[in-house]
Image (cartoon, helix red, strand yellow):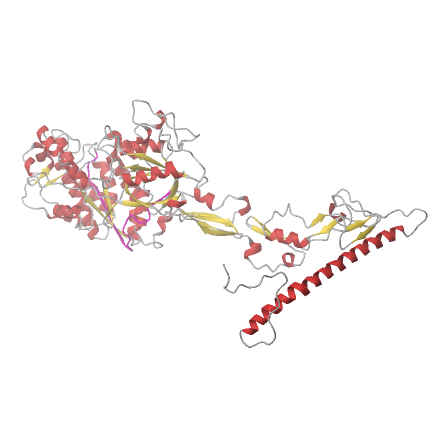
């Protein structure tokens, strides 16, 4: 991806190249920064801390979506928690930058990979640089992606710097790497990076939510532009442009047909700096004394097609759109570009006006009026022989510069949506996601929810399918996962027995409903006195009337019983059982019977109980053993019982006497004293002084000491 001035520097003479190179920083500074948001979710003390990040101009930002993931920092620094799968740290070669810069493949760093946990995303944090030998952003992101990253955050290397947009370098190898990046990446400030690292070191794991829901302006009718050129000799970049045009054509036409979006193509024009207008480079790439230029297709000003050839063909395609759009058929531009590449490419040496006109006739046949061809010719100015401004190119320069709140277009390809730059790979799915994000929430065209537009979070291993419990056997197919491009990328439809819940990051899930406490049940099998409602995952069941098992039919609940006497240890505890079930106890483990030996008996109640062989005092649960009377004294046992009863009576009598004495001498005088004190506040009382309490000290004349 080249800025116009960078291209000039490559094509011009050595002296001119040195001077032009000084213009490079200013040109790159014109690349508008599109920001999205990052929110810290965990640890709890950092929740809702927000961070801005500048989206990279490669990869695939999840426009309209959210991604929650665990932060992973690949470093050998022992101050940080181990970050790799299997509990290992990356071990990079000694002659390469440390692992946290991600400048070398992690395969060379001991085969380090990010930990993979089902249903969890991994966001890799890497450092910009190193300062003495920095590597490209593309390399960092690609290496992290190969190690399993779901997104990459690059930390700026110096404090106080403004965020910038990471772009693909003007190198074929880097362009090929960028084309393989399918995750999102961006740059954060040095200060925010240090904050995240300190949290990792001191507070433990960090969970972030990456937010792409509002990076673009929203409007009911979206206007978007595609800035391109007709050069087809720029390798990977040109191939990607053509692939994008072919894939995007049906989507663009559908949006246009629905009246949802207006599209217009544009072609980058640049002006040769005045100090170089006499150079061979300007002469090869420019017309009208260097005012209107296009980049040299093969960087060779002495051979092949020139920048002026590209400029002329750009004008022909631009004019085709103008003529077709005047007839309400502007979408024919997509067909024209695809057909032009098939017949008139530089590779085929047919990059000529004659070939372009042949394509015009083919595409316009029976669709554009007869006068359209002449209108097309009239639209194109004489580039070689004319003088002065060219209106159509002046309009392109003005649009290229943008309005006050728009960014200037400096690189191709560029996509601008409602005045804001699209960031990321020029893929049909990615651009469509961005276009869909530009509509007001809830008013997106139907195609925005197609699986091809957004990641399919509802596939077999998708986080949406897991969260919606689609494959849970208890759901019995009642739960659904619907793929969307908004928010978490999916929505749950929860069936009977399940409830839709929203998580902190805005994602959804289906959770089991406890019907026994959340609904009014009218089934008698759940509501009778001996009936229970048992909650199950996704449903519930009623027990019906639970039988009393403490009888022969119920085998006395499995407890001890004596067939001869009819005694048993079974206790019917239905009330306690119903309370346990209502509290969520396991119905299989709970029981409404228990085993306890009868009053005055001893034993475990399950295998044995020893009955009382004497007299059972039922109220006290005391077994009074029989005492042998000897000499035929049949009343021996009774006398023992009488003695016990007498002892109890004497004890109770003594307690009553003691209580009466305490009341008479202590409680009653105190009550009378307090009553007289209260009444004395309202009326004079006759009689002498209040009697002193037994043992009470006489009051002091001078008042209390504390």
Residue at image coords 68%, 50%: 592
- Pick whichever, 4 or 204, lies toward us: 204
**x, y percent for residue 516:** 58, 55
Q: Position of residue 466 (x, y in %)?
A: 47, 43
103, above or below 200, in the image: above
Q: State the residue lying farthest toward the right.
A: 632
Q: Is residue 451 visible?
A: no
In the rendered image, residue 279 lying in the magenta stretch gets the answer: no
Residue 577 appears at what percent x and percent y?
A: 65, 52
- Horizontal side of residue 10 vs 439, given as left or right: left
- Camera sees residue 380: yes
Q: For residue 231: magenta?
A: yes
Question: Residue, x 45% and y 38% (percent of image)?
Answer: 118
- Residue 362 figure quarter: top left
- Quadrant hosting residue 43: top left
Tell me the magenta residue range: 208-232
State the image coordinates of residue 57 (x, y, percent, origin top left): 26, 39
- The N terminus sits in image quarter: top left
Q: Nearer the viewer, residue 117 or 192?
A: 192
Q: Position of 697 compared to 481: left or right?
A: right
């Amino acid at each position: 991806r080249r800025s116009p001035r960078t291209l000039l520097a490559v094509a011009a003479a050595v002296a001119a190249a040195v001077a032009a190179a000084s213009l490079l920083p200013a040109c790159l500074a014109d690349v508008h920064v599109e920001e999205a948001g990052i929110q810290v979710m965990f640890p709890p003390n950092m929740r809702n801390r927000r961070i801005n990040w500048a989206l990279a101009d490669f990869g695939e930002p999840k426009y309209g979506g959210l991604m929650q993931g665990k932060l992973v920092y690949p470093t050998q620094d022992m101050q940080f928690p181990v970050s790799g799968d299997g509990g290992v740290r990356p071990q990079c070669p000694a002659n390469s930058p440390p692992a946290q810069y991600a400048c070398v493949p992690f395969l060379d760093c001991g085969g380090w990979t990010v930990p993979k946990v089902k249903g969890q995303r991994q966001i890799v944090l890497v450092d910009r640089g190193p300062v003495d030998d920095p590597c490209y952003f593309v390399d960092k992101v690609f290496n992290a992606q190969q190690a399993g990253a779901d997104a990459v955050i690059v930390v700026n290397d110096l404090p106080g710097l403004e965020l910038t947009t990471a772009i693909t370098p003007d190198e074929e190898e880097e362009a090929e790497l960028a084309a393989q990046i399918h995750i999102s990446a961006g740059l954060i400030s040095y200060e925010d990076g240090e904050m995240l690292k300190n949290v990792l070191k001191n507070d433990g794991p960090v969970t972030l939510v990456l937010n792409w829901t509002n990076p673009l302006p929203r409007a009911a009718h979206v206007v978007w532009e595609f800035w391109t050129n007709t050069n087809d000799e720029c390798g990977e970049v040109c191939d990607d442009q053509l692939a994008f045009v072919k894939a995007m054509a049906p989507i663009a036409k559908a949006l246009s047909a629905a009246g949802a979006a207006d599209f217009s193509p544009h072609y980058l024009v640049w002006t040769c700096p005045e100090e170089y207008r006499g150079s061979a480079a300007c002469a090869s790439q420019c017309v009208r004394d260097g005012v209107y230029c296009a980049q040299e297709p093969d960087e060779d000003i002495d051979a092949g097609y020139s920048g002026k050839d590209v400029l002329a063909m750009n004008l022909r395609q631009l004019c085709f759109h103008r003529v077709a759009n005047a007839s309400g058929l502007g979408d024919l531009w997509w067909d024209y570009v695809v057909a032009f590449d098939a017949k008139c490419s530089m590779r085929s040496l047919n990059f000529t006006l004659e070939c372009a006109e042949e394509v015009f006739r083919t595409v316009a046949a029976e669709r554009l009026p007869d006068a359209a061809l002449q209108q097309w010719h009239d639209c194109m100015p004489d580039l070689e022989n004319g003088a002065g401004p060219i209106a159509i190119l002046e309009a392109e320069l003005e649009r290229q510069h943008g309005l006050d709140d728009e960014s200037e277009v400096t690189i191709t390809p560029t996509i601008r949506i409602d005045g804001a730059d699209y960031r990321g790979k020029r893929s049909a799915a990615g651009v469509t996601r961005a276009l869909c994000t530009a509509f007001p929430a809830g008013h997106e065209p139907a195609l925005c929810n197609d699986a091809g537009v957004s990641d399919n979070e509802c596939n077999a291993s998708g986080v949406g399918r897991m969260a919606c419990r689609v494959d849970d056997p208890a759901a019995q197919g009642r739960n659904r996962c619907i793929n969307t491009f908004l928010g978490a990328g999916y929505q749950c439809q929860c069936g009977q027995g399940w409830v839709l819940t929203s998580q902190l990051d805005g994602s959804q899930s289906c959770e089991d409903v406890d019907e026994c406490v959340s609904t009014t049940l009218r089934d008698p099998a759940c509501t009778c006195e001996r009936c229970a409602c048992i909650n199950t995952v996704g449903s519930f069941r009623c027990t019906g009337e639970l039988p009393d098992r403490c009888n022969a039919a119920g085998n006395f609940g499995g407890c001890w019983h004596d067939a001869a006497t009819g005694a048993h240890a079974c206790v019917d505890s239905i009330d306690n059982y119903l309370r346990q079930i209502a509290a969520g106890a396991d119905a299989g483990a709970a029981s409404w019977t228990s085993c306890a030996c009868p009053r005055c008996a001893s034993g475990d109640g399950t295998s044995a109980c020893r009955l009382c062989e004497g007299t059972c005092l039922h109220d006290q649960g005391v077994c009074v053993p029989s005492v042998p009377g000897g000499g035929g004294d049949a009343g021996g046992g009774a006398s023992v019982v009488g003695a016990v009863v007498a002892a109890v009576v004497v004890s109770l009598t003594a307690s009553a006497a003691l209580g009466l004495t305490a009341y008479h001498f202590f409680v009653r005088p105190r009550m009378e004293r307090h009553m007289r004190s209260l009444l004395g506040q309202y009326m004079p009382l006759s009689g002498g002084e209040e009697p002193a309490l037994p043992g009470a000290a006489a009051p002091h004349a001078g008042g209390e000491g504390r």
